[in-house]
Amino acid sequence: MRAAVIERYGEPPVLREVPEPKADGATLVEVTAAPLNPVDISIATGKFYAGSPPTPYVAGGEGIGRLLQGGTARPRVYFRAALPNGAMAERAVVSRGETVPLPDAVPDEVASALGTPGIAAYLGLTLRAELKPGETVLVLGASGVLGSIAVQVARLLGAGRVIAAARDERALAHAKELGADATVDLKQTDGLTDRIKEASKGQLQIVIDPIWGAPAVAAMDAMSVYGRFVQLGQSASPEATLTSRTIRGRYLSILGYGSFFVPWEDQAVAYRRLVDYAASGKLKVTGDLTIRHSENHLLFSVGTRQLIARLLDVNFPDYEKILSKGNDKVAIVPRLACQAAIRRVSLFSSERARGVKLSFEKGLLTLASASQELGEGTETLDIGYDAEPLSIGLNAQYLLDFLDEAETEKVKLELKDENTQCLCQPEGGIEGASRYVYVVMPMRL
């Protein structure tokens, strides 16, 4: 059978043929859908706090499928997979009988989304926050699956006011359609606490936080006395700087959530409740990416849009071999401040070149751009940089494209000299998330 196999920690899975798993007294399932969750990525790094199976192993901690008995497929279930025989395969092994039957009214992609992210959203509000009717709830990262489910569940559980916070304007508009009373844009952190206070009308008892970082700190500063802050992830940053005054001055409770510490019985109850909500039309999961495969094609679906890609049996070049070596000058730059500065400075560049000169010296970055028609614009930023001074010309739009996509508070720029590529990477973020390098070629200015 075909499966997505983690052959080495820290590397993407390989789609290849593997032997069918042996049940050995356990239950086999014919898989019809398998979601990819942040926890799957963390496990694949080999550094996950709860441990990782030895390589090679089939990835995927949960899925949707039909139980097999006597070679015959039975009704659909949501299941937890027993690694190393994970869910990202044609057949998987069920972990300790952990299954929940599924009604026909809930399709595979919705049932998948209700798993790890849905259970975390539901139990974060009930088991950890102990939401009471009439309380105000702020959901950070409301553009994600967990966040969008949390917005709806908070409303279904009787929250008096629900606030959705995210960076994507379309996602915020959608959150209102799902039941949010107000929204907060997280793209700009300046004045964020005041904007949260305004949206919550001065009363904020519960925060659901799958992102951490600066937005989490701003949210805590906006909370009411005896507020409960539920921490579920770190998609914005693995770190946040808090003051003692923030926590003690409001008598806040900061509550961690991890599914590995919750008995399966409690998770199954939560999942059944979510399935009931979805089957009755009270809970919607839309706009999420679904990937299906056949022997020769991959099908990507987002809402009503579909993309079909043909699988090619070819060897692609190792792109790391063409990246510059020896980029030993490292700058750690605040993403949002740099993004805003480039937008302002680039207004002075020529429309054709769109070039910005970046000059690095110890602890400081100067951005400059000039044209005969408009004159010159410069800005300076405090950064982390301790190498010898260096100046390099880069395309402003290419830098902005990277900064728009990176969701971490800081980014890392690796440099060598004025004639060599600048290698850009997010700094921090989800542990074990996909590693990537954004390459910007130098230009003469």
Image (spheres, rainbow, N blue to C red):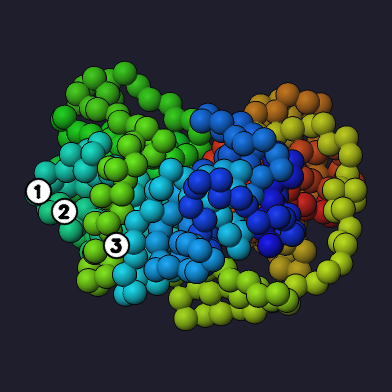
Residue mark closest to the camera, 1 vs 3 = 3
Image quarter of residue 258: top left
Which residue bears the numbered disc 2?
157
Q: Is residue 102 above or below residue 206?
A: below
User: Viewer-proximal residue, 196 or 78?
Assistant: 78
Circle nearer the N terminus (2, 1): 1
Separation of marks 1 and 3 at Cα, in angstroms? 22 Å
Type of amino acid at the residue the image marks with label 1 = Pro
In x, y percent, where is residue 4?
A: 67, 55
Q: Are marks 2 and 1 in contact (CB under 8 Å)?
A: yes
Separation of marks 3 and 2 at Cα, in angstroms? 15 Å
Q: Judging from the image, what secondary structure is the residue with disc 1 in? A: loop
Q: Residue at x 32, y 75 (%)?
A: 105
Which residue bears the numbered disc 1?
133
Density class for disc 2 (Cα within 10 Å; few <14, some 14-19, many ≥20) is some
In the rendered structure, find residue 143 and report the number of the disc placed on it. Answer: none
Q: Judging from the image, what secondary structure is the residue with disc 3 in? A: helix
Image quarter of residue 107: bottom left
User: Viewer-proximal residue, 73 or 214?
Assistant: 73
Type of amino acid at the residue the image marks with label 2 = Leu
In x, y percent, where is residue 435?
A: 68, 45
Residue mark closest to the camera, 3 vs 2 = 3
Which residue bears the numbered disc 3?
275
In x, y percent, where is residue 93?
A: 53, 51
